[in-house]
Image: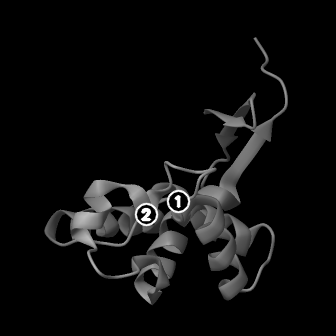
């Protein structure tokens, strides 16, 4: 996988899973639920929430507050935050979907296996 950290590219791969079946089941469960009803899953905010909780070991309230400030809430410095997405606004009108337990549960169900099995590669080997 290729991503970025700041302005620099970041390379990573997922470590081998011994028993991927239950994890795949969880992902398919999220997918299936999302086909039939709206679910509070927002890519950037949910990733940051899980990352702060799992890697930084923040308590859930602090992890959510950091994710809210970094990815969810738009400002003059972050005009493309997820709360400014017109489709999210239509689906979750008059609510704060990241304040729900469902958001926290889905975020961890999706991102915990990825975060715990990702391995950063400092250089590419050819």
Q: Which residue is mark 1?
A: 74
- For the residues bearing labels 2 and 1, Cβ distance under 8 angstroms: yes
Kindly state the secondary structure of the residue where label 2 is placed.
helix
Residue at image point 66% right, 38% down: 13
Q: In the drawing, what numbered circle is on residue 117?
A: none
Percent x, y for residue 99?
48, 84
Percent x, y for residue 16?
64, 48
Pick the residue in front: 39 or 25: 39
**Which residue ends up furthest to the top in the rendered image?**
126
Specify which label sits upstream in the sequence, 2 or 1. 1
Q: Which residue is mark 2?
A: 83
Kindly state the secondary structure of the residue where label 1 is placed.
loop
Q: Look at the picture and state if 99 lies above or below 23.
A: below
Q: Is residue 50 left or right of residue 89?
A: right
Count of numbered circles in the view? 2
CA separation in Å, label 2 and label 1: 6 Å
Pick the residue in front: 30 or 4: 4
Residue at image point 80% right, 76% down: 57
Q: Look at the picture and state if 111 lies above or below 37.
A: above
Pick the residue in front: 105 or 15: 105
Q: Look at the picture and state if 63 lies above or below 32.
A: below
Percent x, y for residue 71?
58, 59
**Which residue ends up furthest to the front in the rendered image?**
76
Q: How many residues crowd mark 2 within 10 Å: few (<14), some (14–19), many (20+)?
A: many
Q: Is residue 36 left or right of residue 56?
A: left
Quadrant where the C terminus sits is top right
**Which residue ends up furthest to the right in the rendered image?**
122
Q: How many residues crowd mark 1 within 10 Å: few (<14), some (14–19), many (20+)?
A: some
Residue at image point 68% right, 64% down: 51
Residue at image point 29% right, 81% down: 94
Percent x, y for residue 23?
47, 65
């Amino acid at each position: 996988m290729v991503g970025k950290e700041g302005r620099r590219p970041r390379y990573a791969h997922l470590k081998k899973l011994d028993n991927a079946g239950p994890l795949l089941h969880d992902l398919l469960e999220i997918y299936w639920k999302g086909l039939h009803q709206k679910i509070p899953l927002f890519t950037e905010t949910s990733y940051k929430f899980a990352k702060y909780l799992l890697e930084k070991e923040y308590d859930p309230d602090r992890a959510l507050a950091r994710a809210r400030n970094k990815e969810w809430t738009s400002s003059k410095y972050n005009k493309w935050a997820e709360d400014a997405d017109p489709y999210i606004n239509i689906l979750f009108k008059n609510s704060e979907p990241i304040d729900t337990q469902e958001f926290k549960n889905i975020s961890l169900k999706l991102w915990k296996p990825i975060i715990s099995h990702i391995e950063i590669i400092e250089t590419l080997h050819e």
